[in-house]
Amino acid sequence: MSAPRLSPDTKRAILDAYLAGDKIAVIASKFGVDPSYPRILFRRHCIAEDTKFLKPKSERASA
C-alpha cells in the first residue's frame, strides 16, 4: 500500500526547504519522502508553472 498523499502545506514546506538550499537527503528524511521527491516537486510546481506555486495567492491572481 502506498503512503498517504502529502498536504499542500507539507509540499510547500518541502519546496521552501529545497529553495533554502537544504540538502536533499535531509529534506527527504525530515518529511519521509524518497530523495528524488523534492526535485520532482520543484519541477512540477515551479518550472512547469513558471513559479506561480511559490507566490502568495494575492500575487497569483494578478500574474
Image (cartoon, grey):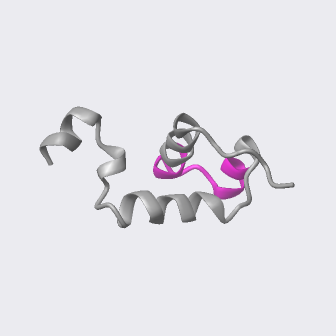
Return the residue found at the far front.
Answer: 1
Residue at point 65%, 57% (across, down): 24
Return the residue found at the far right.
Answer: 1
Relative side of 62 to 16, left or right: left
Relative side of 54 to 5, left or right: left
Percent across and percent down for residue 53 are 36, 48
25 relative to 10, above or below: below
Magenta segment includes 21: yes
59 relative to 39, above or below: above
Residue at point 73%, 52% (across, down): 33
**What is the magenta range?**
17-28
Q: Nearer the viewer, residue 18 or 60?
A: 60
Percent across and percent down for residue 16 are 48, 43
Percent across and percent down for residue 34 are 74, 59
Q: Main secondary structure of the magenta part?
A: helix
Residue at point 28%, 61% (across, down): 50
Picture quadrant of residue 62: top left
Relative side of 51 to 13, left or right: left
Quadrant where the N terminus lies? bottom right
